[in-house]
Amino acid sequence: MLGGFSPGRRDSRPAFHLMKNATLALICLLAAGSSAAETPSAGPRADTLTFFIEGVECPSCIYSVWQAINGIKGVSDINVQQRIDSYATVTFDPAKVSAHQIAQAVTDAWPLHGKPYVASLTLRVPGYGQGGNAAKVDAVLAAQKPWVKIEPLDKSKGEFVVSFLPLKLDKKTGPQGWNPDTLTRALHDSAPNGLGLKAEFEKGE
């Protein structure tokens, strides 16, 4: 009988050869699994920003803002809170949508009390007042003017408010307008590409 197993026939090969082959096969499988585990596939990037929102006065406002942001492709999580400083914390893929588009969606939400909602970011640069940093930081902030207006909240603490200028969207897909990466890289990256300063956006409580 060729290519089969007969119960009346004994394998003439020594048993240790079978064990050796099985061991080698197991080692190969483990090595392949280890290699796959060491090189995981890169998933989509997720950024989280807190947008402080003017005009939120009631639970229906919260839903209106949430609904406007939820309709954006690339947004994966939204938490809208009504506080003295109401905010929406949004997690999104910057390869699909920009912070500017999210802010514009807030402005375009149905205004339940007559005035549009307005989204902004709060930027902190703790080293702003040290040495000659102030003039350098001001120059970086001024360079963002085509897309956003950045004004001081408290210069002694290096705090600024980032207000989004109106964004006219076209029909193309993907991010449009301003994303904070441009600003944070210019502040945070080491010279000569940046100022080497700590820069962060305030988060909602």
Image (cartoon, rainbow, N blue to C red):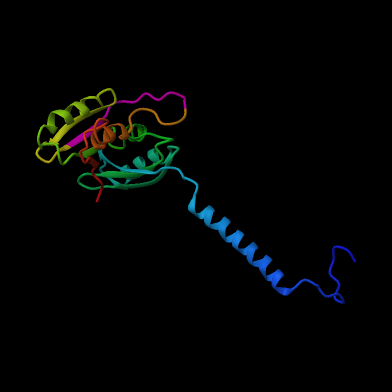
Q: Position of residue 176 (x, y in %)?
A: 39, 28
| Side of 131 where 87 appears, left or right | right
Residue 106 location (% of width, % of height)? 33, 35
Residue 195 falls left or right of residue 157: right
Residue drawn where x is 21% and y is 38% of the image: 123
Count of numbered tags: 0
Q: Main secondary structure of the magenta part?
A: loop
**Residue that protrudes farthest toward the right in the picture:** 1
Magenta residues span 160-172
Residue 189 lies, in percent from the top left, at 26, 36
Q: For residue 16, what is the image quadrant?
A: bottom right
Magenta stretch contains residue 65: no
Residue 118 appears in the figure: no
Q: Quadrant of the N terminus?
A: bottom right
Q: Nearer the viewer, residue 28 or 156?
A: 28
Query: Is 21 situated left or right of 27 in this image?
Result: right
Does the magenta-highlighted stretch encompass residue 167? yes
- Judging depth in this view, the residue of 114 and 93 nearest the camera is 93
Give the residue displayed 11% in from the left and 32% down from the top: 132
Occupied quadrant, residue 90: top left
Q: Which residue does the image show at 56% across and 58% down from the upper left?
A: 31
* Residue 172 visible in the current orientation: yes
Q: Position of residue 150 (x, y in %)?
A: 20, 30
